[in-house]
Image (cartoon, rainbow, N blue to C red):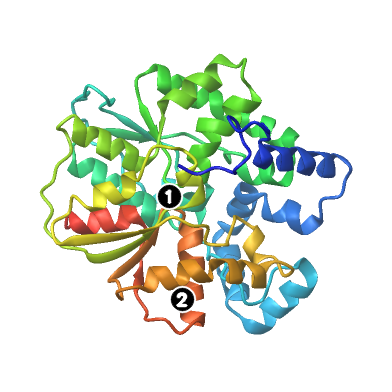
Amino acid sequence: MTKCPYVPPHPWNIDFPHLMLRAKAVNFKDDKATFRDKLLSSTDKLGHFAGIPIVTQAVNAVNSTGLARLVMEGALGVDKNAWIPEYAPKTFPQLAQKSEDLPVVDGAKTPGKVAIYATCYINYNEPGIGQDLIKILKHNAIPYELVDKEACCGMPKLELGDLESVAENKEKNIPKLAKLAREGYAILTPIPSCTLMFKQELPLMFPDCDDTQLVKDAMWDPFEYFMARNSDGLLKKDFSKELGHVSYHMACHSRVQNVGQKTAETLKLVPGTEVNVVERCSGHSGTWGVKKEFHETAMKIGKPVFRRMAEEEPNYISSDCQLAGHHIEQGMEELGLPKSEMAHPLTLLAKAYGL
């Protein structure tokens, strides 16, 4: 669905994205990565530290204060105007209820039980999205469990070129995930970058690791899983709330998985719902869009997306990548476009079920 023009099977046979990752790895090995970039890529460590109650309040206060953001821009190079997420007072595992003891109903295409790899963002920043995933699973009588003591998937470190840290995180995660895969769980990740890491990047980096390949086969995007359950005749469609017009941004890391527009297809199952799909880079690109030297460019890149998302004045704007969603929301506001409620697709599906 999406790729650079010169990747295989093009005659030039150039995998440009991974070529640039190799350049970043050389850059990191030569000790050219900045303290700022190392800090921003340490999402799990930042989240763990900022999750301490008194620290959470202090960090959120700093993030929302103009003067403090100005100081942060000078000290760390984080643009004072860039949207950055707050930290939640409680993490997703602290909030998540244990699954009911439900029978496992496998489908022809889908396992009937789910393991949730929550991701750093859901764990520390917006656990409500994870809660919405749990609500949907419970409504569909699908038993679930959380991956215990998960580490970061490693995508931020990969994009930094820190391959040693990627390998360290892989050793923390893969044994746990492989055990769940062997036990017949579908492993769901609510953030597409993390899904992509386990589906594509780690298998490419560790082709001889059987457990990594096993996890690859067990990993699902949530909406890929829901549409497969629908094909199995096992997804409930007792929706009680129309969503109206939804402008949905299909994130780059969703497109590159090549599973189709599963989020849009799922939302279209809801009666009284129209989905405008925008398949173009929002300009955010992980931590890149918050950096002082790139934020203005990130907003320029996103302008076509901001305008297309605002077409027909939707009831909701949404993206599988919540960081992109907030970036789009900020861009629409700066352009003076009509304001719409921003909500993650999992939140929208939970709303449609009346949960």
Q: Quadrant of the C terminus?
A: bottom left
In the image, 137 versus 230, the foreground residue is 230
Give the vertical position of 258 relative to 335 (above or below).
above
Q: Residue at x 55, y 69 (%)?
A: 57
Where residue 251 sits in the image (x, y, percent)?
47, 52
User: Which numbered dot is residue 92?
Assistant: 1
225 to 289, vertically: above or below: above
Label 2 SS: helix
Q: In this image, 90 relative to 27: left or right?
A: left
On the picture, is 241 further left or further right than 167? left
**Vertical comparison of 326 with 219: above or below:** below
Q: Residue at x 18, y 40 (%)?
A: 140
Quarter assignment of residue 72: bottom right
**Relative height, residue 64 to residue 28 (above, below):** below
**Which numbered disc, 2 or 1, marks the residue that appears first in the sequence?**
1
Q: Is residue 25 left or right of residue 1?
A: right
Query: Where residue 28 sits in the image (x, y, percent)?
Result: 82, 43
User: In the structure shown, which secondary structural element does the residue marked by tag 1 occupy?
Assistant: helix
Query: Label 2 neighbourhood size at 10 Å, few (<14), some (14-19), many (20+)?
Result: many
Name the image quarter holding the N terminus: top left
Residue 89 in view, yes or no: no
Residue 125 picture location, percent across and down: 49, 58
Kindly report which numbered mark, 2 or 1, lies closer to the viewer in this rendering.
2
The residue tagged 2 is 332
Amino acid type, mark 1: Phe
Q: Is residue 288 visible?
A: yes
